[in-house]
Amino acid sequence: MLWNGFRRSSGRGPLNLAALNVICDRWGVEDLQLVGRSGPSEPMELLVRFAKSAPTAVRAWRALRDELAALCGRPVELMMA
């Protein structure tokens, strides 16, 4: 997976990549990429590609978004790859 560019918006250093891997494994994320650049008060735009066996329900999509937002400390917008 590609994790380049993931940083906490508070400037406290890099994200906990182990926690990011756990979230992605839970929701069947095959690849996750940071798209574009945004300021600390703007949502992070993430391109996500799911494994074929991943849950596709809207509820799972929202849960993934919410968990990533909590980890990043800012809103997240997901886009399907």
Image (cartoon, grey):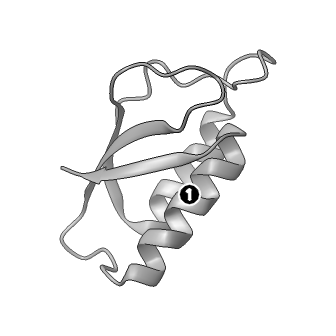
Q: Tell me the kind of residue under disc 1.
A: Ile
**Residue 74 screen position, x and y as percent:** 66, 40
Residue beneath the point at 79% across and 22% down: 10
Judged from the image, the secondary structure of the residue bearing numbered disc 1 is: helix
Crowd around label 1: few <14 · some 14–19 · many ≥20 (10 Å): some
Q: In which quarter of the image is residue 80?
A: bottom left
Quarter of the N terminus within the rendering: top left
Residue beneath the point at 69% across and 45% down: 71
**Above/below status of 9 relative to 20:** above
According to the picture, the residue beneath numbered tag 1 turns out to be 23
**Above/below status of 58 relative to 52:** below
**Residue 39 screen position, x and y as percent:** 57, 20
**Residue 18 screen position, x and y as percent:** 63, 41
On the rendered structure, is 12 left or right of 56? right
Q: Of 27 and 76, which appears nearest the observer?
A: 76
**Residue 69 screen position, x and y as percent:** 63, 49
On the rendered structure, is 56 left or right of 44? left
Residue beneath the point at 48% across and 22% down: 38
Residue beneath the point at 44% across and 49% down: 77
